[in-house]
Amino acid sequence: MDNDYAAGLTQKLIIVRPYLLIAWAGLRREATRIVEALDAALPRTKQLEEHPEALFEILNSCSEGTEIVALVIAGSSIFPFCARTRGFEIDDKRVYLLGSGAGDFFSFLQECPELVPSQEQADGLLARTTMLRFAARAMAFQIIGKGLENSWGGGFEVAFPTPDGFQKIDRLMFRAWKLERDGTYEYSGHSFFSRYVGHDLLLSCFNPEEKTYLIKSPLGESSMPEAHETIWPEWTFELFILPTGQLVEAARYHPPHRPVSDFVEYSHGALVGWHWDKAHVDDVARQAAAFVAEGVGFKRQSY
């Protein structure tokens, strides 16, 4: 394979402006060229100007071997513009699949329990949870498989629109457990915590080795982590693996005003300690075992 194709860890969702998100797959140098050209040409405003010729001209210059989807916020709508790729409809949703992970994500879409529209709220948490399910699975399988240095490059970031523009999900705690049908569980040996420092992503793996990866953004200067930090997750994600190979996932969102018992400690950007909310994991493990017995596909709980 051409060494220029993104392998290992790479940011493949780039927020160029609050109103512009670039998703890419393929040649790293070409994607970087496109992103840097957009950054140089587009106005640094919250909205795209009325005549976005520069955006279209740069996207049209995308060369063979690279796929790009540009999402543009205009007013209350989001418009997709594709370069060397196309989307399709599935269950009244528009989907764009890029890169070597496209087949895995398509299978996930087919297997994923459909969200009941009435369950979704204006905050969009259910949509983010659905995407986090795939992102967390993708990261876990990359860790367990050939290792992060030889992984497919992306699949672990989730971006979403807000009134102030696009944002990425930050401060995600992921843990994988082996679950028995009676609700007892044990640690699988695979966990990670991801967070952003400026535009750069820091990904800390807890096991089988404790290591922090710096995944740089093609935009902006790198930011230096503080000397000592204690960080609480915004999301926690528990993946339970049954002896049959079945997977049960539990995602929990922590609003800023709700303190949690989970936290991680860093020294100069390196992971030095972490604490987990055992009472919460005990509870969701019991529920996960019950869901398997009852055949429940999806359930939302407020706490």
Image (cartoon, rainbow, N blue to C red):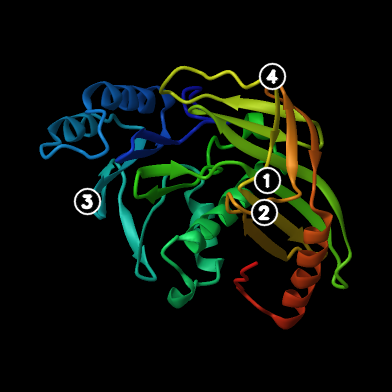
Q: Is there CB contact under 8 Å for labels 4 and 2? A: no
Question: Residue 243: where, in percent of width, then height?
Answer: 83, 64
Specify the label residue 227 is tagged with.
Answer: 4
Specify the label residue 75 is tagged with.
Answer: 3
As drawn, the residue found furthest toward the bottom would be 294
Q: CA distance from mark 3 to mark 4?
A: 41 Å
Asked whether, in this view, residue 40 is left or right of residue 166, the answer is left
The disc, 4 or 2, on the residue closer to the chain's N-terminal end is 4
For residue 84, which quarter of the picture? Answer: top left
Specify the label residue 237 is tagged with.
Answer: 2
Mark 1, other Cα within 10 Å: few <14 / some 14–19 / many ≥20: many
Mark 2, other Cα within 10 Å: few <14 / some 14–19 / many ≥20: many
Asked whether, in this view, residue 159 is left or right of residue 259, the answer is left
Q: Residue at x 68, y 45 (%)?
A: 173
Amino acid marked by disc 2: Phe
The disc, 3 or 4, on the residue closer to the chain's N-terminal end is 3
Amino acid marked by disc 4: Ala
Amino acid marked by disc 1: Met
Question: Residue 149: where, in percent of width, then height?
Answer: 65, 29
Element at label 1:
strand
Q: Which residue is mark 1?
A: 173
Q: Residue at x 53, y 38 (%)?
A: 154
Q: Is there CB contact under 8 Å for labels 1 and 2? A: yes
